[in-house]
Image (cartoon, rainbow, N blue to C red):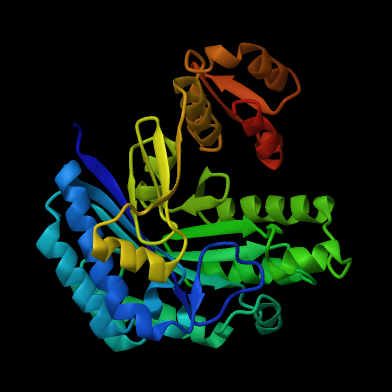
Amino acid sequence: MPAIRHLYFHIPFCPKLCPYCCFYVEVGAKNKTRGFLDALLREVEVAARGHELKPTTIFFGGGTPSALLADQLAYLFDGLRARLDLSALEEFTLEANPATIRADKARVLREGGVTRLSLGVQSWDDALLKTLGRVHTAAQAEKTVGILRDAGFDNLSIDLMFSVPGQTAEQWRATLDKTIALQPEHVSSYCLTYEEDTEYFRKLTGGQFKQDDEHDAQLFETTMDVLASAGFAQYEISNYARPGRESQHNRAYWLGADYLGFGPSAFSTVGTDRWENVRDTAEYTRRVMAGENLVGFTEHLSPDTRRGEIAAFAMRTSEGLSAADLAPWEKSVAHFLAIGLLIEEAGRVRLTQRGKLLADAVAAAFV
């Protein structure tokens, strides 16, 4: 069995539930933390019996992984080093909220092997941060960037969100300019989406918020133009990087690599099998320690379905796909080429600038 090279860890704890968030999170669950960490390490032990785990990338997402205390993070990192062969590890990313980083925690992250921080800034406008329900201020976020640089981190991603209710084009441009001035190695920029079972979705359906596709497209085009002018390559629809600073972990997802997820609600995909751990921290912890099945959802993908998924994700990247790989969707590809959403160059097909604005519609043709 081939080695699993990509591992994801879901840390569900958050200081506050953001009104737009649809991920599985828990607020105010400090009494569960040590038991959860022990369960997470036990899950790794069990997985290592059935798979060769030799990661080249590790990604801690959530939730808010940086909400763990410094000693809890050290305990977790020590436990992973004792259970995993990390000799091939090239990238170790951890998502962080600016309000949860202090100098002592930054040192623990660095000493624990983290090489890349994904900093959830979202906006440099305090009024918009309040709208988003964030627990940090713009000043805190800027200070956090300095703390991480002082700790020796040379690979920072600043994560941003546009089309926030009430956000103007001028506010978005100011956020992009401020981000560029701080010289991160990577920027992730996402259009706000209204997901079911969120406060924002309820406000949308209740008429308090409204969507404006033309405004969304304007802000997206501004993002592409401004970041390109600043030297960032758009290597995926929502992701921009300095040369050599692309997220290796996310690229592995997009290109169809196998990966294992650990923690409540974490997904795994190996070959054509996909499963999700149970979405409840207490139940997850109980099942792990009792040696019970953790799976809350499972599906077996047909080879055609899996190929379609990989094609849909790969088409969102700057490399696109070879024309030969797109043969099963020949008619759809020909249509998109004809209307200017795709372009073929040197045997590869990728999105045009206009196609990037309609990337979801193009991807839907493959799945």
Residue 256, horizontal then vertical, whole percent: 40, 34
Number of marks: 0
Front residue (pair 288, 38): 288
Quadrant for residue 95, please give it. Answer: bottom left
Please identify the residue farthest to the right as the structure is shown.
207
Q: Is residue 96 above or below residue 57?
A: below
Residue 19, horizontal then vertical, whole percent: 66, 72
Front residue (pair 205, 115): 205
Q: Is residue 110 above or below residue 161?
A: below
Q: Quick check: 126 left or right of 154?
A: right
Front residue (pair 364, 345): 364
Q: Quick check: 252 left or right of 27?
A: left
Residue 110, horizontal then vertical, whole percent: 24, 73
Front residue (pair 114, 356): 114
Quadrant for residue 288, please give it. Answer: bottom left
Residue 74, horizontal then vertical, whole percent: 21, 77
Check the picture and name the quadrant holding the N terminus.
top left
In percent of the image, x 65 and y 26: which residue is there?
A: 365
